[in-house]
Image (cartoon, rainbow, N blue to C red):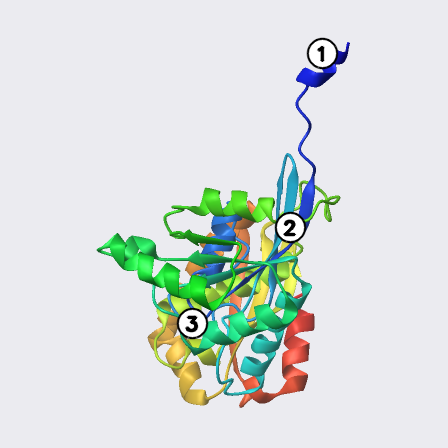
Amino acid sequence: MAEAKKGRRRKAPFRAGVVAILGRPNVGKSTLLNQLLQFKVSAVAPKPQTTRENIKGILTGPDYQIVLLDTPGYLGRPAHLLDQQMVRLARDALLEADLVVLMVEPLPPGDIEETIMKMLAEERKAAILAINKVDMLRNKAQLLPVMDEYARRHPFREIVPISALKADGVDLLLQLMVRHLPEGDPLYPSDEVTDRSERALAADIVREEVYHLYRQEVPYAVAVAIDEFREQDPEHGGKDYIRALVFVERQGQKGILIGKGGQALKEVGTRARQQLELLLGRPIYLELWVKVRPGWRKDPQFLRWLQETNR
């Protein structure tokens, strides 16, 4: 009997905790979150400031559960109230986290990275450095001095080169995150992937398509509120009916957004509807209305209303 006990393998302890993903705008945080979950919960676009709030994704394995927080890109100099709000949200995520993943590009640390590393040190947070976009390096030897420089600046638990877009190194990063999580019980049901509502996902997808299709200042001046969301609406042939209000700050931006004969806005609607149908697995009737709201990015009352409307 004693010999049988000796030969048994001990079951790995269950680990669970919050992991915040921080970094400068457009470094690939949302791409990493979606890649880890294999499910789209966060908007992705080739422009900074696509993510404007902390977005939660829940990844559960046989012996772990990671609550991932995708944060807005950290800004060195917030220009208005919306920017200030995004910086505060990133800081809040750092404070809440059991572990922080600092995502950077394969370049020496800049002011933003220095600021985040300073916060990590002050709060004594365990952190992993994920050096993203390594697939873009022609010479991988360029990576070594970057890794050395970061290792000198902060005592990271791990330093991992990855390509979030191509999923290179993402499995290793996941293993290392689990290793550094505290032991504990799951925080959410095992089948839950996000706590985001379908309204919030719909608003994100509409705004994501604006980011993809427009240039210059228009995407940054856009806010989306889901005014109505009716499932299996009989008035629209049993399709889900979604009415989205698309806010801009100036009349000229409204004209650009709508386009000649409404064709530009129609393209946004078509692409957003297709994405929503794929994500939700149901037919969608999507209606877009463009409204002008001067200075909404500086208006605390409007920002609160926007948050409540999309919950």
Amino acid found under the numbered disc labelled 2: Gln
Residue at 58%, 51% (x, y): give it: 239
Tell me if residue 201 comes above or below residue 248 in the rendering: above
Q: In the image, residue 54 lies at what x, y percent?
A: 60, 65
> Is residue 240 in view from this perspective?
yes
Residue at 67%, 16% (x, y): give it: 7
Q: In the image, residue 71 lies at what x, y percent?
A: 56, 66
In this rendering, would 90 be left or right of 270?
A: right
Tell me if residue 246 comes above or below residue 148 in the rendering: below
> In the rendered image, which residue does mark 1 sit on?
3
Q: Quadrant of residue 107?
A: bottom left
The image quadrant where one finds the N terminus is top right
Q: Secondary structure at mark 3?
A: loop
In this rendering, would 219 be left or right of 99?
A: left
Q: Are marks 2 and 1 in contact (CB under 8 Å)?
A: no
Q: Total marks drawn? A: 3
Residue at 52%, 70% (x, y): give it: 117
Amino acid found under the numbered disc labelled 3: Pro
For this rendering, which residue is in front, 132 or 285?
A: 132
Amino acid found under the numbered disc labelled 1: Glu
In the rendered image, the residue lying farthest to the right is 1
> In the rendered image, which residue does mark 3 sit on?
48
Measure the C-alpha gap from mark 3 to mark 1: 60 Å
The image quadrant where one finds the C terminus is bottom right
In the rendered image, the residue lying farthest to the top is 1
- Disc 3 versus disc 1: nearer the observer: 1
Can you tell which mark lies on residue 232?
A: 2
In the rendered image, the residue lying farthest to the left is 138
